[in-house]
Image (spheres, rainbow, N blue to C red):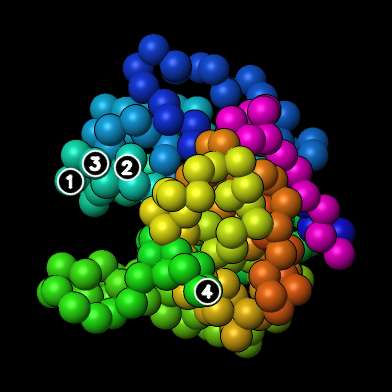
Amino acid sequence: MTRVAAVGDIHMGPESQGTLRLAFETLPDCADVLLLAGDLTRHGTPEEARVVAREITDLGVPVVAVLGNHDHHADRADEVTAVLRDAGAQVLEGEATVVTHGGERIGVAGTKGFGGGFAGRCAGEFGEPVMKEFVRYSRLRADSLRGALEELAGNACDVRIALTHFSPVPDTLAGEPLEIYPFLGSYLLAEAIDSAGADLAVHGHAHSGTEHGLTSGGVTVRNVAQPVIGRAFHVYHLR
């Protein structure tokens, strides 16, 4: 059985240093990997990233992350990524990694993802250039997730996990205003997950959403935004 700890939207800044460390130090007793589902900082500065780095350094389990929209706000995402990688985290954007712990081979494919909405109520790649660019960016993120999951298919993983910040399904957005669903996720992510296959999909972003969801292809989806799960992390057991 693979034990996957996950949390997103921890939004750390200097004054929150140490608030998660004690909980994270229990991870070797209960989890094989820690997934961070984006929005790790408040404004995407390297200073805030260093706060996160101190929380996740030398935890005794692998740490895999994607960035969120907050982590891009200061236009310093490359620096934020570098700080987290220096702390030992694997930060993915359209990439795959296989981590091992306790004899388990855990494949993770990650992307921030993007918005656009869901089937029947989604933006189309039509009209003004800025609208086409919006939808094209979302499609590129989804295509990169599909490619990363397909890469894992040949790597003899015990489990394959799709890690995003934006949601692949509307189920886990229940509780959020319907008007902002197009800015919280995209059906293109779910299409990528279903076509390539995964055992679990994890995302954040929707603070007022719901934890449990399912793609139309039957893949379990979990919204692990910290305001939703109400704890430092949640552990999922995958057979």
What residue would you read off at disc 2? 71
Name which of mark 4 and mark 3 comes first in the sequence.
Answer: 3
Q: Secondary structure at mark 4?
A: loop
Assess whether mark 3 and mark 1 are in contact (beta carbons under 8 angstroms): yes
Q: Tell me what residue is drawn at x 50 percent, y 50 percent.
A: 178
- Residue segment shown in magenta: 223-239
Q: Residues within 10 Å of mark 3 (few under 14, many from 20)?
A: some
Cα distance, mark 1 to mark 4?
Answer: 31 Å
Quarter-wise, where is residue 79 in the image?
top left
Assess whether mark 3 and mark 2 are in contact (beta carbons under 8 angstroms): yes
What residue would you read off at disc 4? 119
Please identify, in this view, whether the residue under mark 1 or under mark 4 is nearer the observer. 4
Q: Secondary structure at mark 3?
A: loop
Name which of mark 1 and mark 4 comes first in the sequence.
Answer: 1
Above or below, comparing residue 63 to residue 127 in the picture: above
Q: Residues within 10 Å of mark 4 (few under 14, many from 20)?
A: few
Q: Indicate which disc residue 75 carries.
A: 1
Type of amino acid at the residue the image marks with label 1: Asp
Q: Quadrant of the N terminus?
A: bottom right
